[in-house]
Amino acid sequence: MSLLKLMIFLPVLMLSAFTGTADGYYTYGMSECVYSASDYSDMVYLVSYSFNKAVDLQYNSTVGKFVGSTEQGVKMAENFNNNPAYLQQRKAQVDGYCKHNAQVLDSAVRDKAVQPKISLKSVKQAGGSHPAVLMCSAYDFYPKKIKVSWLRNGKEETSDVTSTMELADGDWYYQIHSHLEYTPKSGEKISCVVEHASSTKPIITDWDPSLPEPERNKIAIGASGLVLGVIIAAAGLIYYKKKSSGRILVPN
Ligand SMILES: *[C@@H]1O[C@H](CO)[C@@H](O)[C@H](O)[C@H]1NC(C)=O
């Protein structure tokens, strides 16, 4: 299980002074909140000040003071570190800024799990020596963490299973596709099992080996056409019978 790492970047101060047209100077400050525990017990507040591309100094709430990394930065760090009130204020940001914002963001985004839409279909029919392939797809789920597995007659099937990564759709949602290669046997039951934060129970989709959907549609359309044809033919026949019998009944 990979730790969920969330970082909040917030430019505190951005100041650019441009001289002339081409060259310029860029000085900026950045504050970050870094954590992975859901109770925020490992929350770290970082502040860094940079000039052009070089970081001059950084505050790390675990260290509790500023550390300079350039000649100028060392001097600035010394200044800040000699100001206990200022350091106290930085430290207070762990709760007042980081944990507060993390709570707001988590309830707005991270805790909003969206259940995947599952599609289970045959991508290759068995024939000759090659086995059949089923594809189980999960679409439009959030967050990213998901488990897709296969059951064959109630037992987890792990061999001949391949899966894509969780693919980002670019709109916060993800999709994933898992393939099962198998040699069909009559009477067996194959299911795709999806486990995700959006559902307390695994989402189980059973494979219906009868006929793939396009085939079913073709049969349905054909059957409707046949029924319609029979009705029209019957109507025509009844009409013809009535007409012809009507003629016969007319006395000479
Ligand atoms: C902050 O300081 C702690 C303790 O020295 C260190 O483990 C951690 O990596 C530092 N964080 C960053 C982002 O530099």
Image (cartoon, grey):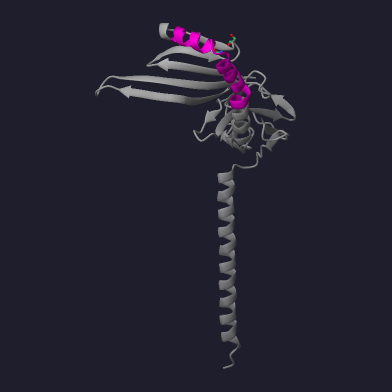
The percent position of residue 185, horizontal first and vertical second, equals 69, 31
Compared with 54, 191 (above or below) is below
Tell me if residue 80 is in the magenta stretch.
yes
| Residue 69 seen in render | no
Q: Is residue 216 left or right of residue 14?
A: right
Tell me if residue 85 is in the magenta stretch.
yes
Query: What is the magenta range?
Result: 73-98
Residue at image location 56% in from the left, 27% down from the top: 166
State the count of labels. Answer: 0
Depth order, front residue of 224/165: 165
The percent position of residue 9, horizontal first and vertical second, equals 51, 25
Q: Quadrant of residue 179?
A: top right
The percent position of residue 163, horizontal first and vertical second, equals 58, 25
Residue lying at the far right of the rendered structure: 154
| Residue 80 seen in render | yes
Q: Main secondary structure of the magenta part?
A: helix
